Amino acid sequence: MEKTVIIIKHDGVARGLMGEIIKRFERIGLKLVALEFIQGTEDMGKSHYPDSEKWYRKVGERTLSEYKEKGIDPIKELGSEDPIEIGKLIKQWNVEYLTFGPVLAMVWEGPGAVKIGRKLVGETNPANALPGTIRGDFSIDNAELANAHKRPFYNLVHASGEVAEADEEMALWFENIEVMDYSTYSAKLTGVEGRLGKK
């Protein structure tokens, strides 16, 4: 059994999409084990995103690739074509976005929860997200809009990318006492918990 952190960002909250997003995770069979409506601080935002050269490079190279595809000059728009410098700028934008307003932070549990969570939310860039995903159904943001306003994609929701990342995010957003352990009614009826080793 895995746990994943899902955060409905301030644009999802402001647009009244919390119930719709929760429904999608419940409908697929994941179990909600923690929930908190919270205003994140700048320190929380900075801790939420990695502070490593590997992460900065990955984010910067992805941004450069999108800019190249769209014919956007990174030096003109971002002041650099160095992926690490661009990654640091994107992180600052992400921190500002995550802490702009209240968010709904959640922990969902189930087999393969991290992978399922990523599949449900869709591609980071909403313009590339498939219909049926949260971002594909509810966001029309794209690289041009984000670039024009010097901000990250408004993509409604965060989903942990790996189990280790989910563990770090749970420690940041929740205390252990806030993560519940309980049995769902449907799991009792179907005997799933017994087969998964739960009493």
Image: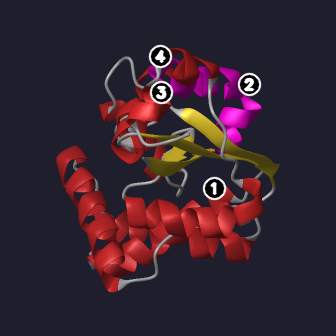
> Looking at the picture, does residue 94 appear above or below residue 192?
below
Question: Which amino acid type is shown beneath numbered disc 1?
Answer: Tyr
Q: Which mark is residue 190?
A: 4
N-terminal label among 4 and 3: 3
Q: Position of residue 90 (x, y in %)?
A: 46, 66
N-terminal label among 4 and 1: 1
The rendered magenta stretch, by its main secondary structure, is classed as helix
Question: Which amino acid type is shown beneath numbered disc 4?
Answer: Thr
Q: Position of residue 195 (x, y in %)?
A: 39, 33
Q: Which mark is residue 134?
A: 3
N-terminal label among 1 and 3: 1
Q: Single out the mark in the foreground, 1 or 2.
A: 2
- Marks 2 and 3, Cα distance to the nearest angstrom? 13 Å
- Marks 1 and 2, Cα distance to the nearest angstrom? 17 Å
- Marks 4 and 1, Cα distance to the nearest angstrom? 42 Å
Q: Is residue 132 left or right of residue 105?
A: left
Q: Secondary structure at mark 4?
A: helix
Crowding at label 3, few (<14), some or many (≥20) Cα neighbours within 10 Å?
many
Q: Secondary structure at mark 2?
A: loop
Region in magenta: 8-29
Q: Residue at x 69, y 29 (%)?
A: 18
Per the image, is 166 magenta?
Answer: no
Does the residue at mark 2 contact the one at mark 3 (Cβ under 8 Å)? no
Q: Single out the mark in the foreground, 1 or 3.
A: 3
